[in-house]
Image (tube, rainbow, N blue to C red):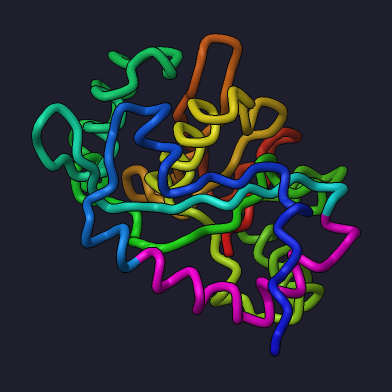
Amino acid sequence: MEEEPELDNLLHQISLDDPEQCLTVAIIPDDRNRLQLRWQQKMRDPGIRHLLDDKGARAHGYALIPRVPRYFRGGQTVPTNLVNLVRSFPQLFDNVAQIINKHCTEAFFVRETPELDWAIVAVEALPESRGRDYRNYMEQKTVIKKYAQKHKTNERRIQRRRLIDALYDCIVITAITKDDVLSKTVDLTETRVGRQNFACINFGDKGIRINDVGRQQGHQQIRRSPSS
């Protein structure tokens, strides 16, 4: 019989009950059942097992999170999109008005929602994705390829997060664990802003901040936070 992977190597483990207790939201019963089934599949994934069993991974914190495309709050079902997360948890953001005014016309503002699944994410972007030359979007692809090889998986399984995924992860981890993730680094996401830029997210002194940078632009704090 195959042994269960060692979850204690993770910095944070978010359960299906935690959002209801700490965020005053509930997971839809059908989504909860599907997540429970998905859990068994996720834990049999060779890449996930390798990551969880790797003692070296303890040097970089990871969190286990149940992602949901909708949640039950205030007597109604609410899509897990950017506008609803901002409205539901304004206290966690640096400048709500700025985010709404800047991004309200972007397609991702309403259309992007997380896929129903368990995710294992780095709580800070990987140190390897920042070099002395300040790696840009394209150069970080090489870093993630090496990261995938290290954990015996492929690049399709190690994804660059979309903005909605990174935002949802930040809110859930911060509200439940009181740990301000992405407080030391900025995560460059897969979500496009306009025609040329990509959205990036971090946790500043006053809360979550969302900005954007160009494909060729690099910065010493902008890195990539993988999601499995």
Q: Is residue 133 left or right of residue 224?
A: right
Query: Which residue occupies the foreground of this view, 226 or 7?
Result: 7
Q: Quadrant of residue 143?
A: bottom right
> Quick check: is 44 in the magenta stretch?
yes
Query: Residue placed at 40% from the left, 51% from the top?
Result: 191
Query: Residue placed at 87% from the left, 48% from the top?
Result: 59
Q: How many marks?
A: 0
Q: Quadrant of the N terminus?
A: bottom right
Query: Residue placed at 60% from the left, 81% from the top?
Result: 44
Residue most extreme to the bottom: 1
Q: Is residue 74 left or right of residue 65?
A: left
Vertical position of residue 129 compared to residue 210: above or below: below
The answer to whether residue 224 is seen in the rendering is no
Query: Residue placed at 28% from the left, 14% from the top?
Result: 97
Q: Which residues are magenta?
A: 35-57
The image shows residue 56 at horizontal and vertical percentages of 90, 59
> Quick check: is 36 in the magenta stretch?
yes
Query: Which residue occupies the foreground of this view, 138 or 77?
Result: 77
The image shows residue 87 at horizontal and vertical percentages of 24, 23
Residue most extreme to the front: 1
